[in-house]
Amino acid sequence: MTSITLAAPLAGWAMPLTEVPDPAFAQGLVGTGMAIDPTVNELRSPCDGVVLSVHRARHACTVRAASGAEVLLHLGVDTVGLNGEGFTAHVQDGQSVKTGDRLISFDMDLVGSRAQSLVSMMVVVNDGYTVDGQSVNREIAAGDAAMTIHGGSGADAAPTPAAAATADSGETAERTVPLRIAHGLHARPAAALVAAAKAHPGTVTILCRDRSANAKSVVALMGLGTVLGDRLTIRATGPGAQGVVDNIAGLIDSGLGDPVVEGAAAPAASTPAAAPAQPAAEEEVGPPFAPGEEALLKGTIAVPGQAVGTTVRRFRRSVRVAEQGAGEQVEEPRLRQALDRVVAGLTQSAQRMPDHAAIFQAHREILDDPELLDAALADIRAGKSAEWAWQRAARMQADALAALADPRMAERAADLRDLEQQVLTALSGKEPSVGLADLPAGSIVLADEILPSDLAGVPAGRLAGISMAHGGPTSHAVILAAALGVPTVVALGRQAERVPDGAPVVLDGNRGELLVFPPEDMLATTRTAVAARAARREENRRTSREDCRMADGTRIEVFANLGRVSDAPGAVVEGAEGCGLLRTEFLFLERQSAPTEDEQYQQYQQIADALEGRPLVIRTLDVGGDKPLSYLPLPKEENPVLGLRGVRVGLREPELLRAQIRAILRVKPAGICRIMVPMIASPSELQAVRTMVDEERAKLGRAEPIELGAMIEVPAAALIADRIGAVADFLSIGTNDLTQYVLAMDRGNPHVAAQLDALHPGVLRLIRLAVMGAKTHDRVVAVCGGSASDPMAAPLLIGLGVTELSATPAVIADLKAFIRTLRLEDCRRVAEAALGTDSADEVRRLVAEAWPGL
């Protein structure tokens, strides 16, 4: 029997749970443990372990100890109603913690004045544990021994194969009900639901918004993140399943002990006992759109562009796999052979799409993850089939990734879902799917989520567009879609399931919209516009390699932003006059160790060769914040976006930066490359890098100097651009970060990201200050952020004094054509007027009035 001692997570008066003014905790419905009336405002981890979940209201956190005990820490009573106000979480789901690490801080005055009580609970919520040695009815300090727990093999442990077969045999039932509890399934209603579910010997699952949870786990139910108005599907298996489903549905509808919000829809009628899950879900989203029933679905822009065509549905359906296997000696070799087949297929995919081989290499590394394989093998050794074990292991990791706050990491869950399907296909003995290669030309694919393997064999020009109900704009599948030039919209929601096969649609990747059954005249108009745009683009591409000069002769250089070796040849074709930003992160991300100096040199040299003598501006490694590296152990930060990022990482890890500098200095011919340093906030930072550059240049025996530039991304850098310009050879404005810092809006936060606009007059004023400061030393000022690719921004940036734009390759031909129509006098006049406006919307109206063709 395992025993561990939990430390007090708070300082204050320790008391038994029976004294808590909340019946769910006082009666032990949530779990067994103790309570503390706090005298401090910081909640700390009571043990070494992993954060299972931080509640969306940030008032509760669950830590799983190494023994498997799941410890719920709940600050105050009825604090869920504050909706996070007064609470700050310092950890995230899946994060490892040590005893005493800070989990949550809170405003004691605010919370104490608005909650029923500040008394906070520490309870073990999974079964099979007993508690003794409680240190209660006394003052306790944070970190003191608080209680000892024993056990770990109880009702939550996996049942034996025989017991599972008995409990889950026979009847299956499900029912969907609306959630009428104001604050969702927080601890109290979750505990009441668990008590009802545990009375049933079979499995009980709650499904909500494409996520599922074991109804016998308080933590799992809280982890669903439910809110008022969600529709919960209760699914049960085993004898008496229908009665259990009806009972729990009634409890949910009555509030599970919490007040219900009147006016919510009545509970849905129960489904037949043996009904599969999917029909119930289809009924929730409504019937298919009928011909002539015009419908507009809004999603998220992933790959810009427009397309007109007919839909081809490729929604996936879950496949039931046999749970019980034929024994470890049979199932383990089957799984290993299937994994070998998938690895071979990934190698072939990398050969078909060599420019994106890194994506398939990343999939290979996922398959090599020992935790993934060990989890599957553990289930196989417990008697499960290879299919069941692999599916469970892959889904657990995918769910954990999907729950992360970082959208880029959450989108990696799609990679795991892809590999789940590929391995299951290999286990079935079937040939791998041909993905989307067999579709008729001009199709607009509609799916819940397109996976990278679907696109691996698609010939260029075969797809007209892609629309997904789920997915994110930076997923690997979207990267491949962009490489194919396919307009893509993601996150359309479940209403996308209502679009029938063969429906005529207009996909607008510039606006993130899918128009279903549009009027015939609109279809015709859009087809004409798409054709005209394509023709205009071809015309622009014919002159794209010429130097870019405005109508009055003013020279404006238009460079390309590149993210990998394969981007360079296409950028030259589009008319790039050089590379104004090489994002070197492609060499460092999604691998287990840093690239060597030689690896970097070879990649930089290939890009320089592809640019055929044009300038190559290489940005030094820009990680930290939203781009962590598994092999670079940076300290955990409360706000990584304001912490170790860009040049700060390079100065902290000088050998990493020096290796990159040496690789750049080796590129031939000397003078083609320039070095650009990100996140500069003071001249001293750039001077420190210049010292490194000079030292490494001397060691290599290189006589030729190399230009060193500073990225202006921090507002302070724009304000002292004259001081930075004294050290820098050129300045380049990164409008993406500059905008988020100026407007105090995290570009990764979906609640505010839509309001970020680099044409905000505050951002434009800082750009003008940067240009004026650079003029003190006659330094060139470029813009390499997202606004350089925005045609509306071009006349404003030029009017403010920017003479170089580094844009996405796909827009360069059109951007140069537009700039050739501009006059500097007009750009200056409109830019000056823009500085006197109050909002980005006003600025865009000014530009649209001055140049109506945009």
Image (spheres, grey):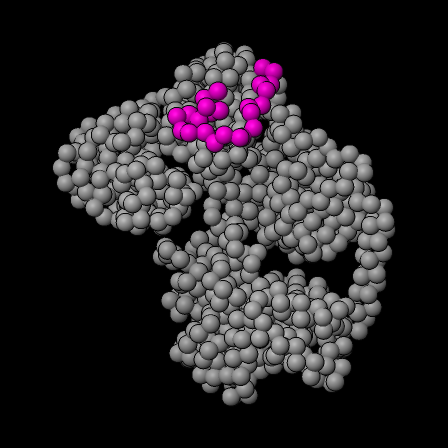
Residue 732 appears in the picture as rendered = no
Residue depicted at 34% across the width and 36% down the height: 78
Q: For the magenta stretch, what is the residue range?
A: 250-274
| 44, 292: nearer the viewer | 292
Residue depicted at 43% across the width and 32% down the height: 185
Q: Position of residue 220 (x, y in %)?
A: 43, 32
Q: Position of residue 195 (x, y in %)?
A: 38, 21
Q: Position of residue 841 (x, y in %)?
A: 62, 64
Q: How many marks?
A: 0
| 204, 338: nearer the viewer | 204
Q: Quadrant of the N terminus?
A: top left
| 794, 118: nearer the viewer | 118
What secondary structure prevails in the magenta region?
loop
Q: Residue furthest left?
A: 138
Residue 428 in the magenta stretch? The answer is no
Left/right placement of residue 271 relative to residue 544 reads left
Residue depicted at 67% across the width and 31% down the height: 286
Residue 748 appears in the picture as rendered = yes
Residue 261 in the magenta stretch? The answer is yes
Q: Position of residue 679 (x, y in %)?
A: 47, 69
Left/right placement of residue 142 relative to residue 351 reads left
On screen, residue 135 above or below 783: above
On screen, residue 511 above or below 285: below
Q: Give residue 260's quadrant in the image.
A: top left
Residue depicted at 43% across the width and 20% down the height: 197
Q: Quadrant of the C terminus?
A: bottom right
On screen, residue 836 above or below 284: below
